[in-house]
Image: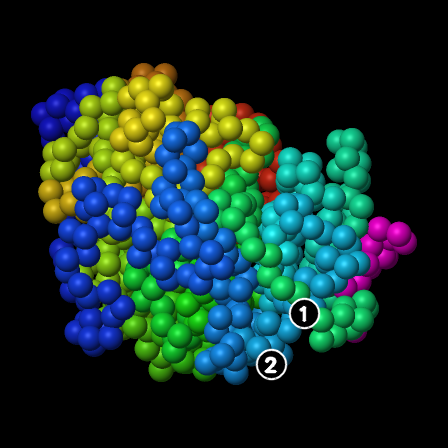
Amino acid sequence: MADQQSEVSATEIAVHWQEEEYYEAPASFVAQANLTDPTVYERFSLENFPNYYREFGEMLDWYKPWDTLLDSTNPPFWRWFVGGELNASYNCIDRHLEKNKNKTALYFVPESEHDPIEAITYQELFVRVNELAAYLRDSIGLRRGDRVTVHMPMVAELAVTMLACARLGVIHSVVFGGFSAQACADRVVDSGSTVLITMDGYWRDGKWLDHKEKADQAAALVHEAGRELEKVLIFERHPGEYRSSFSVVDGRDIVVNDVIGQYKGKRVDPERMKAEDTLFLMYTSGSTGKPKAAQHSTGGYLSYVTAMSKYILDVKPTDVYWCMADIGWITGHSFIVYGPLSLGASSIIYEGVPTYPDAGRPWRLAEQMDINIFHTSPTAIRSLRKVGPDEPAKYNYHFKLMVTVGEPIEPDVWRWYYNVVGKREAAVVDTYWQTENGGFLCSTVPALKPMKPGSAGPGVPGIHPVIYDDEGNEIPPGTGKGGNICIRNPWPGSMLGIWGDPDRYVATYYSRYCKDRNSKDWRDWPYFAGDGAMLAADGYFRILGRIDDVINVAGHRLGTKEIESATLKVSGVAEAAVVAAHDEIKGISPEIFVSLQPGVSPSDELGQQIVDSVVREIGPIARPRKVWLVPDLPKTRSGKIMRRVLASISNDSDVGDVTSLANPEIVEAIREMVQR
């Protein structure tokens, strides 16, 4: 092991993953799959770039066809389907009406099982979107190119609002409902929006959360920043009942439910948008300093998420599809709203937490609604395994396809997902992509490539990834060495740029590996993702986590995800987070924070088993300085483990503001444990 490690240069990430076995997709899945043509990879080879993306564009309805497929004259500001005109709202609603107007477009599932599920047909969605668009245009005065900030929970009105904005050519900027008033205000100021659309409150984990308070606070913060929110539009979670304890501010606030009736029966012709016009802004999470808005196009983005939904998620109009993400993130935009609706499928919007009132809720819902595509994150999968490992077996549901997204999934967690949740009946796609990308970068095509636990698979058809070391040298497949994953070619789903900051866009994503700053050739401008990865001999990529999360231990660059995966092999471990702790001898050492499954008691013996597993799986170099067995890990409202907070505790530094976490009280409990 030591000899193996000494071969790894300082610019490469040491990787000790074992190659996992292949799992073939069930024959029943392959027989009905949308993409079974094995020549697709040849057809979408780099030699045929960019012409193969015509197929994606042809999946949409256009008012005017495009003249230029890819305009690359101003790299790296790529423009797709230039000259074409279309509307995203029309493609997601109107074009389905002739044949499928009475088919369910959206199911809204309230958190309470006592409340009825609302099924909204394509015709009903058409009516609601048109009436809201008419109100926003005629009463609020919104016009093409204006920006609107939307701070809403997971309710049907959120999707309706997005599609109404798209109908008008108004750029929507959706802020995750769990974010603070400060985060909302920052995005209002950065985008230059003057209208905030929100809701009085919503249900989460059995509790009523008053959401209007954040709108009032955000308006005050925007004012302090020298700007004004001219209008705050409030939807009522229970129509006809305003339930916020914060009153409506005269002259600024409008309860939408009180006025929308005046627009009953109104119709709005969709704006003919240029393909390269901005559809929405999506701010990347977790960054420090000024907010960074990925600016996504209308034609390129919509064509890409439509194709990814069809070919990777295998979405058909007959499917009932549940993506458990929040619409406030890019996954929700792409794969709850725009992708599935563009294909005419039935997409579920679920209000609350998946474990309310108990861990059986997702599987009861799957059984009740006959859901056949299930889409979630490794964080949610680990959580469901932790609180209800035996629950899926109690319910009679059948998934044809399951998705994992958002971070690398540990092989042991993948196997539980496949064997227990999927009942060995479903194909699993482990998808890799980012807010900035619009849609998938890496994944197996489910009917064409076998699944491999922990591996995202090859680039999706049309995407051509490469691994570079820090010096820009390509790391070939099968070496067992990791580096920085980049994409050789542009693609339609990629963002247009960072809103209002073109220099930051170039510096962040393209400058690092640009071969010639003066070149107009796209080949000289690879996209830098900021993630570590390795490429196996079979062409499958394994994502090692953010490059920022790579720990340099005594000259060896170790990916935190690999150490976490070794920890999760130990029986009784539910979740693990690895951070870089300062060490007087090694400089940096890994420290592991572990939460346990219900009924498992912390012990010195269990801590030693974790250390032994890490040493066995990776080697002595990765031996943790300390294993902390904690009651829970600090998490955001979306379930993401806040490793930054844990690192601050380990290194006795300021943890910052933790009030917006889902469980802020756990931070002090861990601090007392670590720093006593």
**255 is within the stretch colored magenta:** yes
Label 2 packing within 10 angstroms: few (<14), some (14-19), many (20+):
few
Checking the image for residue 267, the label placed there is 1
- On the question of residue 630 being in view, the answer is no
Label 1 packing within 10 angstroms: few (<14), some (14-19), many (20+):
some
For disc 2, the marked residue is 116
Distance, label 1 to label 2, CA atoms, is 29 Å
Q: Does 103 appear above or below 575?
A: below
Question: At 9% from the left edge and 25% from the top edge, which residue is drawn?
Answer: 3
Which residues are the magenta region? Answer: 237-256
- Assign the N terminus to one quadrant of the image: top left
Question: At 44% from the left edge and 24% from the top edge, which residue is drawn?
Answer: 507
Q: Does 266 appear above or below 417?
A: below
Image coordinates of residue 70 in percent, x first then y, are: 36, 42
Q: Amino acid at mark 1?
A: Arg
Kindly report which numbered mark, 1 or 2, lies closer to the viewer in this rendering. 1
